[in-house]
Structures are given as structure tokens and as C-alpha cells.
Amino acid sequence: MSVPTRQEPSGWLLGALGTLVFLNVYAPQSLLPVLAREFHAGAAQVGGVIGATMLAMAVASPLVGVLADALGRRRTVLWAFALLTVPAVLAALAPTLAALNAARFAQGLLIPGVMVALTSYIGEELLPASRARALTMYVTGTVLGGFLGRFLAGVIDARFGWHAAFWGLAGCAVAGFLLARRGLPPERAFRASRDPRAVLGSFRTHLHTPALLAACAVGFLILFTLVGTFNTLTLRLAAPPYGLNSAQTGAIFAVYLLGVVITPVAGPLLASRGPRFALLSAVGASTVGLLLTLAHPLPLIVAGVAAGACGVFLAQSAALAAVQRSVTQARSLASGLYHLSYYGGAAVASVVAGHVFEAGGWNGVVPLVVGSMVLAALVGVLGWKRT
């Protein structure tokens, strides 16, 4: 009697779900100059449109991890996609910057429901032989979603206004729900964890796992770099001598498409050399690229940002691999703790980088983000020594 093979979701499905959820995360970034004019806000103030979402994602991630460990990963993904339609509509109708920030905060509370639960689903439901490729495909999808969100928001704004960009996000949330419902097989390895004492025990265990804590710190630093760079880059390029509009600044984010090529390469690299090697390679690429953006010609700026972004994408793959290596239980909670740190870095960068840009311009931002990446390399080398 033959044993039925385990049904697994395709890598393309996981990549598509990563794309659809990440469309929500960074879409307003190319709109920041438009929103600054619309609401008469400065760089640090308008950066809150991104920061509100990141702060909510950071706060919600551990709670979503506990919820997904109790209710199931697939169910959490479905509900998160379904509910994401509501704040997208509220953002489209927002009459003030405060109302827009509130809607973006609500989006941030729901986005981890997909991200945290889906990465835990991959770690638990997929066979080890296909797990690394699946994680890489998911990260590739998030990279593509990061580009498409920024690019399409800029294009839509140039033709229909910024409100229409958020209507598009509502439609993407519906598409994500339908795709996950059809393509994610029911869990087989999942065992519900609903005992509060067990949750607290797992939480204590995670807090005493050095490799996991190092991964969380690396996550904080690499997204601090990415958000600090792109939040202020749009403002730099919208000002003289460049004077780019929202569609043109959105097109600059085409450098994200390089991540769609780079991150699939990260899977074999991580499998053969480990997260530390991948992280050091990533930091080297990012540092060189970010320093190149100090030049004034636009092509050199774009080339530097491309190298910097590719480094961050590879670092993200390394950190996710380190999380999966460092835990064997309560994976959603561990993933939630990682995302707490990861998006906490983004929330801090949205404010800090804005103030640094107002005080010292781009020449002040570059040392800030380069220092963040170098510190990430140091933490990873020391913290992942035994992984």
C-alpha cells in the first residue's frame, strides 16, 4: 500500500502571496513628495505614512505569532488578506494626514498575519529539501511586491491621483485571499498551542536563544537601512536639480527588480555557505552601493541604490534562514519576534532618517545607513557563530 505524498504549495504561489502582501507595505513611499505638498508636511512628518505601518507591524508581529500558533497558519493568512481590504479603502478616503496615518497603522496590524504565518507554514509544512527554495521564492515575491507597490502607486498617482493607489491595494488584498484559499493546502504538521503557560515557556526559550536574538537585531538594522534610504531618496530626487515627479521616482524603484534575480541565487548560497557568509556578502554590496549615491549624476545614484538594495535583500534571506535554523518549536512566535525587530527598525528609520535629512541632507543620511549595515554584519558574525 503506497503512502500518499505530502501536498505542498508551489514556489510560484508563495512568491505571489509575498508580492500581494508587500504591495501594501511600501506603496506610499513614491507618493511622499505628493503627500508632503498635499498636507503641507515636512520630511519627518510625512515619513509617518510609512512609519505608522512599520510601527503597527512591529507591535502586531509577536501577537500574530501567538495567534497563528493557536489557530493555524493557513487560517491566519486567509483572515489577514480578507481584512486588509478595510484599511485600504479608509486610506483611499482619508481627508487628512492623521486619518491616512491611522488607516496605514491599521494596515500594519494586519500585514503580519500573512507574513508571520506564511513563513511559519513554510518552515513546518514543507519538506526540508524544498524549504530553502520556498523561503527564497517567498522573499523574491516580497521584493517584487516592494517594487510594484512603489512603482504602480507613482504611475497611478500621475494619472488618477494618490487616492486611486489605495483603491488598487484593496483589490490586491481580495486577490491574495482568493489565491491563498485556493492554493494553500490544509496543514498536516501543525499542532495547536493554546496553553498560555506553553506560550510563555516558548517565549522565554526564544529570548534565551542567542542566534535568534542576533537574527532579530540584524533584521532591525537592515530594514532601518532600506527604509531610511528610500524614504529620503524620494525627497532628494523630487527636489532640484532632479525635480522628478511621482511616476519618475516610482520608476527609480525598478532597482528592486534586481532583487528578483538576486534572491533566488541566495537559496543555494545559504545552503552551501550559511547565513554568515551571505550576510557579509550582502553588507559589502550595500556599503559600496550606498557610498556611490554620494555622487551627483543620476545614473550613479541609481546604480548605487541598486547595489544597496540587493545587499539588503540578500541579508533578509540570510536572517530568515538563521531564524528557521535557530528554533524547533513555536515557529510563528519566533517569526513574530523577528518581524517585531525588523519592522521596529523601519519605524525608527522613518523618523530618524527624516530628521537627519532635514538637518544634513543626503550627505547626512548615507553615513547613518552605512553604519547600520556595518553593525548588522558585526552582530551576525558574533551571533550566528554556532548556527
Image: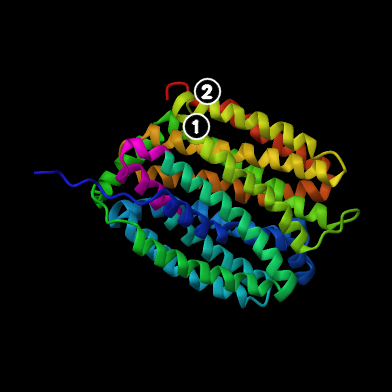
In the displayed image of the protein, which residue is found farthest to the front? Answer: 1
| Percent x, y of residue 38 | 77, 71
Q: Secondary structure at mark 2?
A: helix
Residue 347 to residue 320: above or below: below
User: Answer yes or no: do the residues labelled 1 and 2 have beta carbons within 8 Å?
Assistant: yes
93 sits left or right of 195 in the view:
right
| Percent x, y of residue 110 | 47, 61
62 sits left or right of 45 in the view:
left
In the displayed image of the protein, which residue is found farthest to the right? Answer: 241
State which quarter of the image contains the N terminus. top left
Query: What residue is drawn where x is 31% and y is 49%?
Result: 8
Query: What residue is drawn where x is 47% and y is 39%?
Result: 320
Residue 243 quadrant = bottom right
Colour option used: rainbow
Residue 143 in view (yes/no): yes
Residue 214: mark = 1
Under mark 1, the amino acid is Ala
Under mark 2, the amino acid is Leu
Q: CA distance from mark 1 to mark 2?
A: 8 Å
278 or 319, nearer to the observer: 278
In reply to whether residue 118 is colored magenta, the answer given is: yes
Residue 351 in view (yes/no): no
Residue interval drawn in magenta: 115-132
In reply to whether residue 261 is colored magenta, the answer given is: no
Residue 374 to residue 68: above or below: above
Closer to the chain start, of discs 1 and 2, is 1
Q: In the rendered image, which residue does mark 2 sit on?
A: 382
132 sits left or right of 24 in the view:
left
Query: What residue is drawn where x is 69% and y is 57%?
Result: 47
